[in-house]
Amino acid sequence: MRKFNSILVANRGEIAVRVMRTAKSLGYRTIAVYSEADANALHVRMADEAVLIGAAPVQQSYLDKAKILDAARQTGAEAIHPGYGFLSENADFAKACEAEGIVFIGPTAEAIDLMGNKAAAKRRMIAAEVPCVPGYEDPDQSDETLIAAAKKIGFPIMVKAAAGGGGRGMRLVHEEKNLVAALGSARSEALNAFGSDELILEKAIIEPRHVEVQVFADTHGNVIHLGERDCSVQRRPQKVVEEAPCPVMTPELREEMGAAAVDAARSINYRGAGTVEFLLDSAGSFYFLEMNTRLQVEHPVTELVTGLDLVALQIRVAQGDVLGIAQEDVKLTGHAIEVRLYAEDTTQDFLPCTGRISRWIPADLDGVRFDSGIDSGQEISPFYDPMIAKVIAYGENREAARHRLIEGLKESVLFGLTTNRGFLIDTLSEEKFAKGEATTAFIGDLFDESRLAAKAPDEAEVAMAAVLLYQAERDRARNAAVFVENELLDWSSTHPLITRYIFDAVEEKIDTTVSPRREGGYEVGVRDSVLIVEVMNRGENRAQLTVDGKRKRVHFDASEEGVIDLTHDGKTCRLVNSLAFPLSAEATAGSGRIAAPMHGTLLDVFVKPGDTVEVGSRLAVLEAMKMQHDILADIAGTVTEVFAVAAKQVSVDDMLFEIEANEE
């Protein structure tokens, strides 16, 4: 390994910012690469130098190895840190860096290549006597062979893409009759995500914990582990909550799992940071799942309980230095929990959301860390993962960390997009999670469609929103009409001044009135209630109010005429005053006019004009934000128009299909 003084970060968003923060603190020159969509991104502004590498689609920018290497040549970058995702586990890219004389801050290409294929990795782990889940990982990929192997393994089974991760190309199959369809959809998703449709099968371990062990190795033969992380709270099946240490870990089990992870790393002559993932069953038995040959999204929880900077350790090892830490030096102190804050609509099957973040102010609380790559005014693009930030809390024990994390989420100002914040708060507040009993079945068991459905604001929330919107409009009127005396505001000589709002909120029109009181405060009529609201203090985006004498703290944004966003106790609602806007024709549910729900690429189209469909019939598959989404018929009838074309990109609200309803 050779020494270097400059690091190009071949990534974007929060991980690029996070890597640069450590690199700068160590005195390295940092170089960013960016797409046209990221020209004003935080990681670009933070870097010492930045190079435009192409258009927004990842294939034309962040996944283009030649463009990234050319950027390294232009800037004299001596090392490349790949972050996670994109090219971080691309063996060809690691080889290309080596051929250019550029240090790749990561493992060898050979290790990436071996562990990047689940089938080959599992064969190697079996040879290294690392406990593995019974399954099928051989080269024959015919349906007949896979079906026979599944019968031998026994249902339920997991169908998995041999390449890649993140839940893509993965299906849980409970019965043999569903296997062929699962194989087809898993192959398609895997091929689009990873360029390979190779699959493996594994016996499904029902309701296990997902526990991973952080390993580190240098080029001098030292391999250690830094304890474990519990990543059991997952959905589809991507991680939602991660924590360290695992709530059910014992010193004996940690030693056993840590030794297995170290053996796995030694067996492939590993170098740098890696994660060995296991399934842990209720009896305490654990099984190798996969090895991620990169820094994990959830690495901050390990940093907080060990006091180590994992990026700094990566850079040290990449320089060829001795790791400098022995196994006995690793001490786990306290507890850390991380959640991933996404721009997504949990009421619409977690549909990713795009658009502009109008206001983002992370909470400033002790023990709470925000890893984010966005600023107020920045766009969440359809071309990339919709993660806004990772929010991590540390405490002297698990309960302290959990409470701090909930408070950090509640106290952050975030407006402009629908997010999963409320869902995260609900998850962390669940008794089963609080007791440390969550398994991979946690979300599926506790968060059904009714639990995730949009909730209408209560009377107090509507009353506070109405008063804050009233004051914002009053202030705008005062600024526009400078001749109005302050003492004349909120005053009428004949009768009480009453302002009416009709708010559109969660399929309900809420008739609301606001009337200033002579003795101060406001009388607000909401539904069948009358509430007294007083504004104690009001800043640009935060306010303290009392509602019928009860003190409330809220975040709000009333910068848009006739619209107010309000967050109270972590619950965000958008109230639109329909009286402020002219009536317009609106598309109704069940119209038969099927539009794209987001930007993306149509992978397949299943119907043609003249086809008969039922409600819920699969019309097309849209790939957006690294996930596949089925486009379904909303009425029963006959397809009259097909505007959708496979392999073509579409924008949100582009018309895809028209269906004529059955006469009955």
Image (cartoon, rainbow, N blue to C red):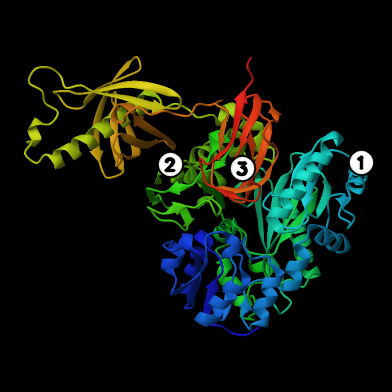
Q: Picture quarter containing residue 618?
A: top right
Q: Residues within 10 Å of mark 2 (few under 14, many from 20)?
A: many
Query: How far is mark 1 from mark 2, CA to CA?
Result: 48 Å
Mark toward the viewer: 3 or 2: 3
Q: Position of residue 248 (x, y in %)?
A: 68, 46
Q: Which quadrant of the figure contains the C terminus?
A: top right
Q: Is residue 417 left or right of residue 437?
A: left
First-in-chain label (1 vs 3): 1
Q: Nearer the viewer, residue 275 or 105?
A: 105
Query: How far is mark 3 from mark 2, CA to CA?
Result: 41 Å
Mark 2 lies on residue:
410
First-in-chain label (3 vs 2): 2
Marker disc for residue 151: 1
Q: Is residue 225 visible?
A: yes
Q: In this picture, is 664 found above or below 176?
A: above
Circle 3 sits in a helix, a strand or a loop, which is it? loop
Mark toward the viewer: 1 or 2: 1
Q: In this picture, is 125 found above or below 266?
A: above
Q: Identify which amino acid the numbered label 1 is placed on.
A: Lys
The residue shown at (80%, 55%) is 198
Q: Is residue 123 left or right of residue 591?
A: right
Could you tell me if the residues under marks 3 and 2 are in contact, i.e. CB atoms within 8 Å? no
Could you tell me if the residues under marks 1 and 2 are in contact, i.e. CB atoms within 8 Å? no
Marker disc for residue 644: 3
Q: Residues within 10 Å of mark 3 (few under 14, many from 20)?
A: many
Q: Identify which amino acid the numbered label 2 is placed on.
A: Lys
Circle 2 sits in a helix, a strand or a loop, which is it? helix
Query: How far is mark 1 from mark 3, CA to CA?
Result: 39 Å
Q: Picture quarter containing residue 427?
A: top right
The residue shown at (26%, 26%) is 533
Q: Identify which amino acid the numbered label 3 is placed on.
A: Ala
Q: In this picture, is 475 found above or below 289?
A: above
